[in-house]
Amino acid sequence: MTAQTDTQGSVTAAYKVSGMSCGHCEGAVSGELSGIPGVSSVKAVAATGVVTVVSAAPLDEEAVRAAVDEAGFELVGKA
Protein backbone atom coordinates (compact mmCIF):
# COMPACT_ATOMS: atom_id res chain seq x y z
CA MET A 1 0.00 0.00 0.00
CA THR A 2 1.10 3.49 -0.62
CA ALA A 3 -0.21 5.53 2.29
CA GLN A 4 0.21 9.24 2.05
CA THR A 5 -0.72 11.93 4.53
CA ASP A 6 -1.73 15.21 2.94
CA THR A 7 -1.64 18.72 4.36
CA GLN A 8 -5.17 18.33 5.76
CA GLY A 9 -4.06 15.35 7.86
CA SER A 10 -5.96 12.74 5.88
CA VAL A 11 -4.43 9.47 4.72
CA THR A 12 -4.79 8.06 1.21
CA ALA A 13 -4.31 4.32 0.72
CA ALA A 14 -4.73 2.07 -2.32
CA TYR A 15 -5.83 -1.56 -2.16
CA LYS A 16 -6.09 -4.30 -4.78
CA VAL A 17 -9.48 -6.05 -4.84
CA SER A 18 -10.28 -9.08 -6.99
CA GLY A 19 -13.63 -9.87 -8.56
CA MET A 20 -14.92 -6.41 -9.45
CA SER A 21 -16.19 -6.32 -13.02
CA CYS A 22 -18.71 -3.48 -13.29
CA GLY A 23 -20.08 -0.26 -11.83
CA HIS A 24 -22.35 -2.20 -9.48
CA CYS A 25 -19.27 -3.97 -8.08
CA GLU A 26 -17.54 -0.63 -7.60
CA GLY A 27 -20.58 0.69 -5.76
CA ALA A 28 -20.83 -2.33 -3.48
CA VAL A 29 -17.17 -2.10 -2.45
CA SER A 30 -17.32 1.68 -2.08
CA GLY A 31 -20.46 1.47 0.03
CA GLU A 32 -19.00 -1.05 2.47
CA LEU A 33 -15.67 0.77 2.80
CA SER A 34 -17.47 4.10 3.33
CA GLY A 35 -19.00 2.57 6.45
CA ILE A 36 -15.63 2.29 8.19
CA PRO A 37 -15.29 5.07 10.79
CA GLY A 38 -12.99 7.86 9.59
CA VAL A 39 -13.34 7.13 5.86
CA SER A 40 -14.09 10.32 3.92
CA SER A 41 -13.99 9.02 0.34
CA VAL A 42 -13.64 5.83 -1.66
CA LYS A 43 -12.94 5.37 -5.36
CA ALA A 44 -13.17 1.85 -6.76
CA VAL A 45 -12.14 1.11 -10.36
CA ALA A 46 -13.30 -2.29 -11.64
CA ALA A 47 -11.04 -2.16 -14.70
CA THR A 48 -7.88 -2.09 -12.56
CA GLY A 49 -9.18 -3.65 -9.35
CA VAL A 50 -7.74 -0.73 -7.40
CA VAL A 51 -9.69 0.90 -4.59
CA THR A 52 -8.40 4.21 -3.24
CA VAL A 53 -9.54 5.17 0.25
CA VAL A 54 -9.11 8.54 1.96
CA SER A 55 -9.46 8.49 5.74
CA ALA A 56 -8.74 10.59 8.80
CA ALA A 57 -6.13 8.07 10.02
CA PRO A 58 -4.52 4.89 8.70
CA LEU A 59 -7.07 2.07 8.48
CA ASP A 60 -6.76 -1.33 10.09
CA GLU A 61 -6.25 -3.76 7.21
CA GLU A 62 -8.55 -6.31 8.85
CA ALA A 63 -11.38 -3.74 8.87
CA VAL A 64 -10.77 -3.11 5.17
CA ARG A 65 -10.68 -6.87 4.48
CA ALA A 66 -13.95 -7.40 6.38
CA ALA A 67 -15.69 -4.60 4.45
CA VAL A 68 -14.49 -5.95 1.09
CA ASP A 69 -15.57 -9.47 2.10
CA GLU A 70 -19.00 -8.14 3.12
CA ALA A 71 -19.35 -6.64 -0.37
CA GLY A 72 -18.64 -10.10 -1.83
CA PHE A 73 -15.10 -9.53 -3.07
CA GLU A 74 -11.57 -10.39 -1.98
CA LEU A 75 -8.93 -8.03 -0.72
CA VAL A 76 -5.73 -9.13 -2.47
CA GLY A 77 -3.49 -6.68 -0.66
CA LYS A 78 -2.12 -3.20 -0.87
CA ALA A 79 -1.75 -1.72 -4.33
Image (tube, rainbow, N blue to C red):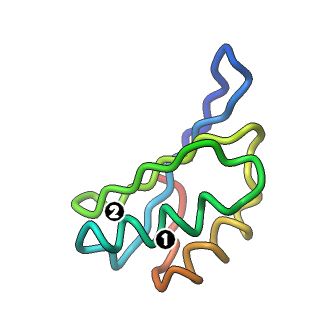
Q: What residue lies at 67% left-to-right and 41% top-to-bottom?
A: 55
Q: Is residue 10 left or right of residue 12?
A: right
Circle 2 is placed at which residue position? 49
**Quadrant in the rendering for residue 6:** top right
Label 2: element kind? loop
Label 1: element kind? strand
Q: Amino acid at mark 1?
A: Val
Circle 1 is placed at which residue position? 76
> Which residue is more in the foreground, 69 or 75?
69
How far from the left and from the top, in percent, is residue 57? Answer: 77, 40
Q: Is residue 43 above or below residue 61?
A: above
Q: Is residue 50 above or below residue 18?
A: above
> Which residue is more in the foreground, 73 or 3?
73
Q: What residue lies at 39% left-to-right and 56% top-to-bottom?
A: 44
Q: What residue lies at 67% left-to-right and 14% top-to-bottom?
A: 7
Q: Is residue 13 above or below residue 6?
A: below
- Alpha carbon separation for disc pair 1 and 2: 9 Å
Q: Is residue 60 left or right of residue 35?
A: right
Q: Amino acid at mark 2?
A: Gly
Q: Are marks 1 and 2 in contact (CB under 8 Å)?
A: yes
How far from the left and from the top, in percent, is residue 20? Answer: 32, 73
Lower position in the chain sequence, tag 1 or tag 2: 2
Q: Is residue 68 above or below residue 30?
A: below
Which of the numbered marks, if any, corresponds to residue 27? none
Q: Is residue 14 left or right of residue 7?
A: left
